[in-house]
Image (cartoon, grey):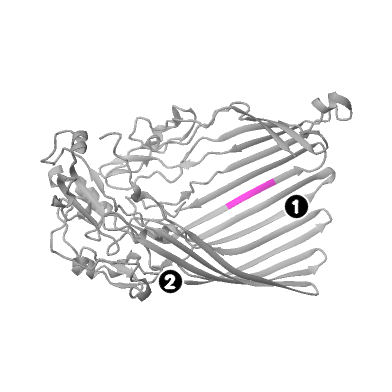
């Protein structure tokens, strides 16, 4: 039923009131050349959020396989004759909580008149987010017992009555606290009753974090300063990594019925026992992401209001979070299955290592990153004509640009295969701003000055090199990394062929594609904006300021990034840019102050 397939009911409504409470204090002690600061903070976060399970039901109207069908999906919907009906047992609410304890001490030491050093350390006891009712569930590979494994048929359905459907699932904490038993309900029949307690309340352990810091400032002379520093920082994972753990058995069940009418959905035939649908999980041994930042630079004040700066800035990231499918079928098994005659092929779920489950997207903290950059800056800060100029030459490399990044299907667990330019890497960035207070008619006096004098013109020009993309191709097991032919990639292309498409081809079935991460540089961005304004003052205390803005003054065509289809060597649109950023536009406004 095209046009009706994405109708959502109130089960997608989000409940999420949040309260943050922080108590903190800081003490400063000055003695001689030392200024010592210390302090502490205790933060408590409370968020009550629902899981948004499919508790209002999901209906599919499909003539195929439905003996009650009229032969038309829309007609079936009008009559209520469904093919499948799926409904979650509840909309569970997690009363999410965490507390963070922090303390620091630092000393700013004036070693000499021209040298200052600051050294310190920050401590944090970082606790994971948990729920008061312990209604979080995780998949823990160490708790998966092959002796209790279900048996998966060739069509992906389970053999009834064999094994434990929820083998490997574990509930947070030791039990539901007594004061929460009216808030939390767990299913306790059949295989639901076999899911044990015993996971950490927040699904991973609290951690003691020490973060040293060191910086210095050294004056070569009255106009030149060298500054540098380094520090270690940690990041608590966002709540979204754990919120979805509400929607797993035994907190939630999904029931499916087939081939009946909406006047009595549960009278239909019970759905066949299928593998547990795609689920999220957290590595019980997860480490908090860490980043070491460091920089050193030279700043110099020049005459006439000019100032220049050159700085090296870098960082190193460790224990970065990504989200691979730990239940992905092995590449060789997928390839061998695809080589069979179609009638002999089995469902992918029959090839997965943890039988009875589909994808298990687990947050794992095993990724890393590096960033190195040269940052140049110059400005003129006095006079009618002022400007800033900044340029960054940087390079960000990683094997996980975001905490939802997955493995490559042909190289599961191979972090080297995933390593390359980050999705947010922009090798070159240049920004220039200009402000000119027009001197014309400034001291002329009278009506002419009031109308035509005192205007201010400002502009901003920005150039940014393109994002880096990875070529894909099609194979017997689906879309994956393309093969690189060795040809030159960069050409003087246009929107119809941005890069040399002959440099990539479909990957072979017997190995991973040889294309590397980020071999294709996308379109750059160039834009000049300009603004004019003047302040008209009257009545002693009234100001009217007309503002004229022009965005993309030269109407530069800035192509948008590639859609997924344009990165697929098997697609006719390979290498094609299909859209562009906004063209030139004007904006007029008036500001009135009184």
Residue reaching furthest to the left: 67
User: 418 above or below 179?
Assistant: above
Return the mark for residue 205: 2
Q: Nearer the viewer, mark 1 or mark 2?
A: 2
**Region rendered in magenta:** 372-376
User: 402 above or below 565?
Assistant: below
Describe residue 586's horizontal placement relative to residue 540 as left or right. left
How far across and down, in percent of the image, does residue 128 sit? 45, 67
Describe residue 2's horizontal placement relative to residue 79 as left or right. right
Displayed quadrant of residue 292: bottom right
Tell me the residue that label 1 is attached to: 299
How far across and down, in percent of the image, does residue 450 sit? 83, 28
- Residue at horizontal 20%, vertical 49%? 337
- Name the foreground residue: 69 vs 336: 69
Disc 2 element: loop
Look at the image and say whether residue 375 sits in the magenta stretch.
Answer: yes
Decide: few, some or many residues near mark 2? Use Cα within 10 Å; few <14, some 14-19, many ≥20. Answer: some
User: 264 above or below 216?
Assistant: above
Residue 583 visible? The answer is: yes
Contact between marks 1 and 2 (CB within 8 A): the answer is no
Task: Name the image quarter holding the N terminus.
Answer: top left
How far across and down, in percent of the image, does residue 579 sit? 46, 30
User: 98 above or below 70?
Assistant: below
How far across and down, in percent of the image, does residue 448 sit? 84, 23
Task: Name the image quarter holding the C terminus.
Answer: top right
Measure the C-alpha gap from mark 1 to mark 2.
Answer: 44 Å
């Amino acid at each position: 039923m095209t046009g009706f397939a994405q109708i959502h009911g109130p089960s997608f409504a989000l409940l999420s009131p949040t309260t943050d409470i922080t108590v903190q204090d800081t003490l400063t002690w000055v003695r001689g050349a030392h200024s010592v600061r210390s302090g502490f903070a205790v933060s408590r976060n409370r968020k009550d959020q629902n899981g948004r399970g499919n508790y209002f039901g999901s209906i599919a109207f499909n003539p195929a396989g439905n003996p009650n069908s009229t032969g038309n999906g829309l007609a079936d919907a009008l009559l209520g004759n469904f093919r499948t009906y799926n409904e979650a047992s509840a909309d569970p609410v997690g009363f999410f909580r965490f507390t963070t304890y922090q303390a620091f001490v630092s000393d700013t030491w004036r070693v000499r008149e021209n040298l200052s050093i600051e050294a310190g350390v920050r401590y944090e006891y970082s606790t994971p987010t948990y729920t008061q009712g312990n209604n979080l569930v995780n998949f823990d590979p160490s708790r998966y017992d092959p002796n209790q494994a279900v048996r998966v048929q060739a069509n992906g359905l389970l053999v009834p009555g064999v094994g434990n459907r929820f083998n490997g699932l574990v509930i947070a904490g030791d039990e539901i606290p007594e004061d929460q038993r009216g808030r939390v309900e767990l299913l306790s029949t059949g295989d639901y009753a076999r899911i044990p307690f015993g996971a950490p309340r927040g699904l991973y352990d609290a951690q003691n974090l020490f973060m040293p810091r060191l910086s210095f400032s050294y004056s070569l002379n009255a106009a030149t300063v060298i500054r540098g520093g380094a520090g270690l920082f940690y990041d608590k994972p966002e709540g979204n990594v754990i919120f979805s753990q509400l929607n797993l058995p035994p907190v939630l069940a999904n029931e499916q019925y087939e081939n009946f009418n909406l006047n009595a959905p549960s009278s239909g035939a019970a759905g066949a026992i299928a593998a547990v649908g795609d689920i999220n999980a957290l590595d019980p041994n997860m480490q908090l992401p860490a980043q070491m930042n460091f920089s050193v630079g030279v700043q110099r004040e020049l005459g006439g209001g000019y100032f220049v700066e050159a700085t090296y800035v870098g960082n190193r990231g460790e224990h970065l979070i990504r989200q691979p499918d730990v239940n992905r079928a092995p590449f060789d098994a997928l390839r061998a299955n695809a080589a069979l005659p179609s009638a002999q092929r089995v469902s992918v779920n029959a090839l997965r290592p943890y039988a009875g489950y589909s994808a298990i997207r687990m947050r794992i903290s095993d990724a890393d990153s590096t960033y190195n950059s040269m940052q140049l800056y110059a400005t003129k800060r006095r006079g009618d004509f002022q400007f800033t100029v900044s340029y960054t030459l940087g390079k960000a490399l990683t094997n996980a640009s975001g905490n939802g990044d997955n493995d490559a299907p042909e190289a599961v667990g191979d972090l080297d295969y995933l390593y390359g330019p980050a999705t947010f890497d922009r090798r070159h960035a240049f920004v220039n701003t200009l402000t000119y207070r027009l001197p014309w008619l400034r001291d002329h006096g009278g009506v002419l000055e009031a109308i035509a004098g005192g205007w201010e013109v400002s502009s901003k020009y920005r150039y940014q090199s393109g994002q880096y993309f990875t070529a894909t191709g099609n194979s017997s097991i689906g879309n994956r990394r393309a093969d690189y032919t060795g040809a030159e990639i960069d050409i003087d292309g246009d929107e119809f062929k941005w890069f040399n498409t002959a440099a990539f081809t479909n990957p072979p079935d017997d190995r991973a594609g040889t294309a590397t991460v980020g071999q294709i540089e996308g379109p750059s961005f160039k834009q000049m904006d300009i603004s004019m304004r003047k302040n008209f003052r009257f009545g002693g205390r009234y100001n009217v300021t007309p503002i004229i803005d022009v965005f993309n003054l030269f109407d530069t065509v800035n192509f948008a990034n590639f859609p997924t289809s344009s990165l697929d060597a098997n697609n006719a649109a390979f290498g094609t840019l299909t859209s562009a950023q906004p063209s030139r536009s004007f904006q007029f406004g008036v500001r009135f102050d009184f």
